[in-house]
Image (cartoon, grey):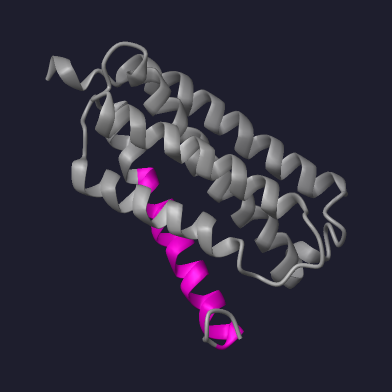
């Protein structure tokens, strides 16, 4: 039981939040690439991604590990994104801090999704049973390169004040 729920229900909620975060984050990033601020999608992305990171800490774990580190990094980045958007209204350097924060938060969600896919899907697990094998490394490297490219384009494209 986690927070009074069977672990299977808690896990389902965590996964659904994560998938909604990834989907809505992709829409937010597409908006950025078109210099558009999609307020509703952004709020959904931020809420579900914060909740995904927070719920991750409640899973049983014998010690501090990589999932905890990713959660701390994600929540720190999301705090900066929230400050940039709601407190500083994307003024000055807060625009690119916001863009890079959204990209990094989405990347971390996808990074964990890829890791989970290699753990849970039989055909991927057979390629990288310990997640130290080349197929896992190459997959994560490709995902990272894609996010770096998208992040670079988004910083250049996202100027919502010029709409």
Q: Is residue 91 left or right of residue 51?
A: left
Q: Residue at x 39, y 53 (%)?
A: 23
Q: Is residue 115 left or right of residue 65?
A: left
Q: Is residue 147 left or right of residue 112?
A: left
Corner quadrant of residue 64: bottom right
Q: Is residue 117 left or right of residue 104?
A: right
Comparing 153 with 49, the one in front is 49
Image location (x, y in percent) of residue 72: 61, 45
Image location (x, y in percent) of residue 127: 83, 59
Question: Predominant secondary structure in magenta?
Answer: helix
Image location (x, y in percent) of residue 102: 42, 35
Q: Residue at x 23, y 25 (%)?
A: 89
The magenta region covers 6-26
Q: Residue at x 75, y 67 (%)?
A: 61
Q: Quadrant of the C terminus?
A: top left
* 115 is higher (above) or lower (below) than 13: above
* 93 is higher (above) or lower (below) than 136: above
Corner quadrant of residue 56: bottom right
Look at the image and say whether residue 21 sits in the magenta stretch.
yes
């Amino acid at each position: 039981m986690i927070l009074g729920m069977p672990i299977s229900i808690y896990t389902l909620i965590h996964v659904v939040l994560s998938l909604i975060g990834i989907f809505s984050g992709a829409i937010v990033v597409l908006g950025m690439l078109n210099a558009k601020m999609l307020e509703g999608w952004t709020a959904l992305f931020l809420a579900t991604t914060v909740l995904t990171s927070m719920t991750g800490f409640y899973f049983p774990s014998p010690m501090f590990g990589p999932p905890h580190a990713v959660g701390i990094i994600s929540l720190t980045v999301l705090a900066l994104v929230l400050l940039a958007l709601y407190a500083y209204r994307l003024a000055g350097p807060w625009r690119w801090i916001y863009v890079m924060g959204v990209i990094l938060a989405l990347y971390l969600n996808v990074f964990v999704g890829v890791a989970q896919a290699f753990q849970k899907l039989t055909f991927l697990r057979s390629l990288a049973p310990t997640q130290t094998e080349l197929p896992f490394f190459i997959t994560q490297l490709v995902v990272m390169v894609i996010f770096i490219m998208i992040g670079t384009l988004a910083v250049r494209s996202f100027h919502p004040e010029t709409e």
